[in-house]
Amino acid sequence: MAALNDMDARARAIFKQLVETYLDTGQPVGSRTLSRIPALDLSPATIRNVMSDLAAIGLLDAPHASAGRMPTDLGLRLFVDGLMEVGAPSAEDRRALEDEAGTRGDAAALLDRAASQLSGLTQTATMIVTDKADRPLKHVSFVPLDDTRALMVLVDRAGDVENRILTIPAGLPASALIQAANFLNAQMAGRTLQDAERQVSAEIEAKQGELDSLTTDLVKRGIAELVGRPGIPPQLIIRGQAHLIQGAETDLGRLQKLFIDLERRQGISDLLSAAKAGEGVRIFIGAENPLFSLSGSSVIASPYRDSDRNIIGVIGVVGPTRLNYGRVIPLVDYTAEVVSRMMR
């Protein structure tokens, strides 16, 4: 793989100017265009030779013989990792994000507003992925439905509510439902589902004889329903798809496949896991992420957290590979920071 230290200062300067020009215009860049940049002060022939060398090591490509050059996915990765200058969001952009996301409301409304605002500022499609299994719980209650069924109501710390139907022994007294809910709340509050399962199982073992058999059975049924059910698909919010269409100069068929894959949640869990693996912003360019490779898109994503600094979701933008990375990266990062703050 090509590295910056394999390039001399002249090649580095030409490569940087070419990528910046391409990201600004979206068009292949020719040697004559670069020769007009005073900072380079090089002839078209010299620039042409360097561009040819950069193409030979996989950093540049040409859409056709008579066109200029454009960076490959590998070239964009090298530029983003080593040459790009990233600033902070402007005061105006920060204020827009804070004013929009800062309106009080439930978690779903907050995420929707944040996604819409980020999409407008970046002119990209925005997506927010939330893994409900990772959200700390706030409250559990049981509501009897009939003689053999009860509704288990889960409220997480973000305020989202999820209902599960449990099968219960016929004739189970209401006091057992209340006792089971009290026991679960004492052990589960503030914990994720996985942590809660371990805690509840340990407490049941430690307090054998303190819980009657009916309550113990109900608690075990509730935990089994929570963790035994096949994985809950991540919640996905997408806003600003029209920006992708506007930016798709060619091959709308590939873009349509991206939309279909997004709606089917294909690859979303992998994206969530990949973004969680890093502490800050993660950047996936073109084929680096299978979900976006076919559409020639890039994604910039950053995790957001709850009050205990647990990662509970990911916010990101999807756009063409010729994104204005220097502006979009800090906006995504700041939006994740605002959402984290509002989730506390």
Image (spheres, grey):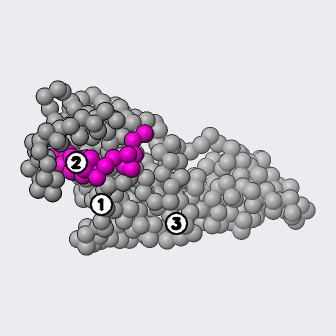
Judged left or right of residue 166, residue 36 is: left
Residue 267 visible, this angle: yes
Nearest to the observer: residue 213 or residue 76: 76
Q: Tally the marks.
A: 3
Q: Nearer the viewer, mark 3 or mark 1?
A: 1
Residue 318 visible, this angle: no
Which residue occupies the extreme right position in the image?
209
- Spatial distance from mark 3 to mark 2, Cα to Cα? 44 Å
Q: Residue at x 34, y 51 (%)?
A: 80
Residue where numbered disc 2 is placed: 14
Q: Residue at x 65, y 55 (%)?
A: 193
- Numbered label attached to residue 306: 3
Residue 337, position as x, y percentages in the image: 41, 67
Task: Please identify the quarter of the rendering in which residue 87 is found.
Answer: bottom left
Nearest to the observer: residue 165 or residue 313: 313
Judged left or right of residue 39, residue 253 is: right
Residue where numbered disc 1 is placed: 85
Task: Please identify the quarter of the rendering in which residue 178 is found.
Answer: bottom right
Residue 323, position as x, y percentages in the image: 27, 49
The amino acid sitting under disc 2 is Ile
Nearest to the observer: residue 332 or residue 109: 332
Name the quadrant of the N terminus. top left
Q: Residue at x 71, y 52 (%)?
A: 223
Of helix, strand and loop, which mostly describes the magenta segment?
Answer: helix
Magenta-tinted stretch: 1-29
Circle 1 packing at 10 Å, graded few (<14), some (14-19), many (20+), is few
In this rendering, the answer to whether 31 lies above or below 56 is below
- Spatial distance from mark 1 to mark 2, Cα to Cα? 16 Å
Q: Residue at x 21, y 50 (%)?
A: 17
The amino acid sitting under disc 1 is Glu
